[in-house]
Amino acid sequence: MIRSGSGRWRSRIATALLLLPAAAWYALLLLVPLVILVVFSFGGRAPEGGYLPDFTFANYLELPTRATAFVNALWMALGGTILCLLVGFPLAYFLATRAGSQRTLLLVLVVVPFWTSFLIRTYAWLTILGNNGIPSLLEDLGFGHIVLLNTPFAVLLGIVYNYLPLMVFPLYVSLERLDKRLLEASKDLGAGRWATFRQVTLPLSSAGVLSGVILVFIPIMGEYIIPALLGGGKVFFIGNALVDLFLQSRNWPFGSAAAIVLILIILTAVTVYLRVGSRGAQFREVSLL
Amino acid sequence: MEPMTFQKLYDDFRLGRIDRRTFLKASGLGLAAAVIAACTPGSSAKPTEAAGGGEPTAADWSPPSGVDLGKTLYVTTWPNYHNPRTIEIFTALTGVAVELNPLGSNEEMLAKLLIGGTGWDVLVPTNYTFDTYGNKGLLEPLNMSMLPHLDTTRYDQKLLANAEYPAGSKTLFGFNKDWGTTGFTYNKKHVTKPMASWKDFFDLAQTDYSGKVVIHDYQLTSIGNALVYHGYSFNSVDEAELAKAEELLIAVKPHLFAITSDYQPPMRAEDAWVAMTWTNDGAQLHADIPDIEYVIGSDGGEIWSDFFAVVSGTTHREAAYAFLDFMAVPKVQAFDATFHKAPLVDSAGIALQTEEVRANKITYPDAASLTNLEFGTAELLTNQARADLWARFKSA
């Protein structure tokens, strides 16, 4: 079909108009704050706190003093993501292939905890992991006195508990669309259960794994509430350091520098991961055809 | 019940806007309450406890006539610090709904005020903030004509003078809500070694009671008491002395149960046996669990006073002054104190408290125990060395 000149114009205007709200949103709420963050990160701290115009690299040079917080967040994000994947995959697989008529009910059950606030769900663990919760039960059973609350274990548990649904749903969607005939074909061609899983199921659900991992990893890197509540201020993430820098010591420039580096770390991790992940996916797609 | 409704209720409960009974009744968690009650020792939210003069009524205070007070008032304060019943009575008398917004530290309060656009009307700042707040124009000088029930001649003038800006000018930016000390609580059930000083506190935290001690998430008190441990001033900003305090804090950190200013829950659940504690929390904990004792460090520490103040540019000025005037009524103060348990400053308010309250050695300690204590200095609110030290310690 050949479009007239005016028709093309109209279509362009319509496209621009339709994109305007999203563009304005990103410009105002993403780009502008990002620019402010970059500018602040080279500034100085005003005497009573806040920002003082300046140009210095001092804030970036001081970042090694927050190395522990960065490392804590990175390890916990990696560990939490892997645990979510290990727990989430079998669950998603079961829901997609074996749940049968119970499937809708079970899916709803996965979502139900989301009906209450993140804060309340995390706060509830304080009671469960506290002295009168699981530790007293374990003590009664003869396991001795065990401290669970305010440990890395508690934080990791809180992370897996809160982020698991974000992992399960993308996995479920990709597994649910998986063509069952391919599994039969694999079996017919002599592949065992493990070989079928490794060569058919896993590659075909890689898109779900990819998005699940990203959905879970990025927010854990910036997590603040879980370590604050279940880590007792002792398991400290860079998110907690940022809150302290902005809301306690009021060192905006240093906080901005830390935030910029956090963004860069996440960006790098996700880029590397997507490169590696999608290369594998492309290869598999070709091999399937 | 809608999840959002429950969430709002829970937040109200957690942040101290409503008491536990109201929360359980409204949320229908009555049965669960029995289970919770078996697990956690009782909260001190007993709003109907008889005060010296009982509940305040319209006979004790009525709003200024012919003034539109509006519908809402935002009060930024500290946790466990207001009798929910006092707030209810104010709302009943004025029609003004009070939103309490509890924060963790004066530093957090300042940080948010500096960012601006808080929408806050009334603050409950501590003595050492007035210099900065006055200097930055964050509070407005009290308009005494709008506070007919406030009689500052009944106040301890030394405590009241903290709210003068500039210091010594007789221009008041607030009046005392109460005062107190920063000491520590310990649970006698588990703590058998004598604990009388900050020396004992930090030494035993690293040995006998390792893993069972809580310090505040607050540079003023945690650094201050670590300084006292070494025999320095609570208010020191000396570089070498701060370095020694940081060394101690870093050494103690792996032995702590938590770094938090919300230490009542772990003390009640016996997750923690020792906690850095303010007078009011100490008295609340002791009232519910008599095994929990409150100690003022024999080697020093902090004495403080909190104030009622009005935020500059408040959009609910009439309601803010009505609330302050209401809180200045001696009977209201005495009633409110049955809940928060901090010592009062207004002599008429103290006179209305029961003999039992006035004889409570946690609320009203002997004057001799206060001699080594220091008021936080204005400099500490904005001192960068201490702010940096604290942020560094926490992320270490």
Image (cartoon, coloured by chain):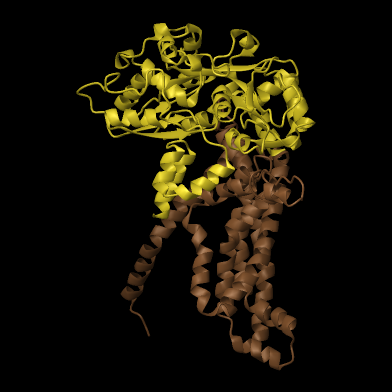
Say which of A237 and A123 sits in front: A123
Above or below B170: residue B66: below
Q: Residue at x 64, y 44 (%)?
A: A132
* Corner quadrant of residue B199: top right
Say which of B346 and B37 sits in front: B37
> How many marks on residues?
0
* Corner quadrant of residue B261: top right
The chain in brown: A
Above or below A224: residue B213: above
In this image, B156 relative to A223: left or right? left
Which residue reaches farthest bottom?
A: A188
Residue B258: horizontal and vertical position, in percent? 67, 37
* Corner quadrant of residue B322: top left
In this image, A245 relative to A4: left or right? right
Above or below B353: residue B15: below
Question: Where the N terminus of chain A falls, by quadrant?
Answer: bottom left
Which residue reaches farthest left?
A: B66
Residue A115: horizontal and vertical position, in percent? 47, 57
Residue B242: horizontal and vertical position, in percent? 72, 22
Q: Residue at x 32, y 26 (%)?
A: B317
In this image, B208 relative to A234: left or right? right
**The colour assigned to chain B within the rendered structure:** yellow
Say which of B8 and A75 sits in front: B8
Which residue reaches farthest right?
A: B207
Query: Visible in this render: residue B137?
Result: no
Q: Residue at x 50, y 49 (%)?
A: B32
Residue B274: horizontal and vertical position, in percent? 68, 30
Query: Visible in this render: residue A234?
Result: yes
Question: Where the C terminus of chain A falls, by quadrant?
Answer: bottom right
